[in-house]
Amino acid sequence: MAEGKTVWLMADPSTVKTNVKLGFSSIFWNTSWIGGQEPHTLGILCKPKNAALGDFPTEYHSNWQWWELISSAATMEMDALPGNLSPIVQVVSDWFDPKKLGLVFEAHVGKGKLLVTSMDLKNNMDKRAVARQMRASLLKYLKSDAFKPTIECTSNQILGLFKCKI
C-alpha cells in the first residue's frame, strides 16, 4: 500500500481480535433472553448495490446464502476506525452491547487502497459455491474502476483489528 497498490487483506477469521461471537440468528434470540450465551449478533446488513457485491446475489439483510459465510467468519470490531467508515457487510450487534461490526470494508491507507474481509474465502473452495461466488465478486470489484475507497485509515488502525503485533 505504501507504493499506492491495491491490497486485499483476506484475514483468517482466527486472527481477528474480537469478543463478539458471530451467529446466524434472528432478532428473536438475543443475549437478554439467553443470559449472555452465544451468539452475540443479530444477523447482517449489507449494501447490495455496492459494486463489491455486484456478482453476489443478496438483499440488504441476512438470508440463507449468508449462512455458510457467517458460519466460517469472525466479526471485526470497528469502533476504533473512523466514524464515517461504513462496512460493506455490517454485522448487527445485540442492542445490549452496541458496536460497529463488520465482515467486509474498504479504506484508503497511505497511498494505497485496501479491502478487508474476515470470512473464510480460502479453504475448501471446491466444495463451497457461496464462498467462491463471494470471492469472485470481490475480486472483480478490486480490479474495477469502481474500487475507490475514500475513508482514510492508518495501518495501525487496521492492524488493531487483529491479534498480530507490529
Image (cartoon, rainbow, N blue to C red):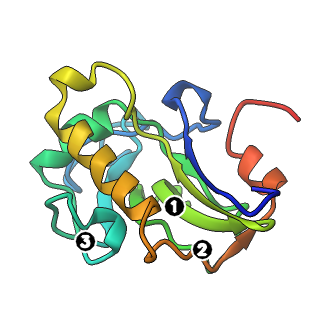
The answer to whether mark 1 and mark 2 are in CB contact below 8 A is yes
Q: Is label 1 in a helix, a strand or a loop? A: strand
Quadrant for the N terminus in the image = bottom right
Of the numbered discs 2 and 3, the one sitting upstream in the chain is 3
- Relative to 19, is 31 on the left or the right? left
Dot placed on the residue nearer the N-terminal end, 3 or 1: 3
Image quarter for residue 21? top left
Identify the mark at residue 105; answer none if there is no mark.
1
Is 40 rendered above or below residue 114? above
How far separated are the C-alphas under marks 3 and 1? 13 Å
> Residue at label 3?
48
Q: Would you place residue 157 above or below residue 159 in this image? A: below
Q: Position of residue 41 (x, y in %)?
A: 38, 49
Q: Position of residue 31 (x, y in %)?
A: 38, 45
Residues under labels 1 and 2: Cα distance?
8 Å
Against 62, residue 107 (above or below) is: below
Identify the residue under disc 2.
85
Give the secondary structure at mark 2.
loop
Q: CA distance from mark 2 to mark 3?
A: 17 Å
Tell me if residue 100 can be seen. Answer: no
The image position of residue 22, as x and y in percent, is 39, 39
Dot 3 amino acid type: Pro
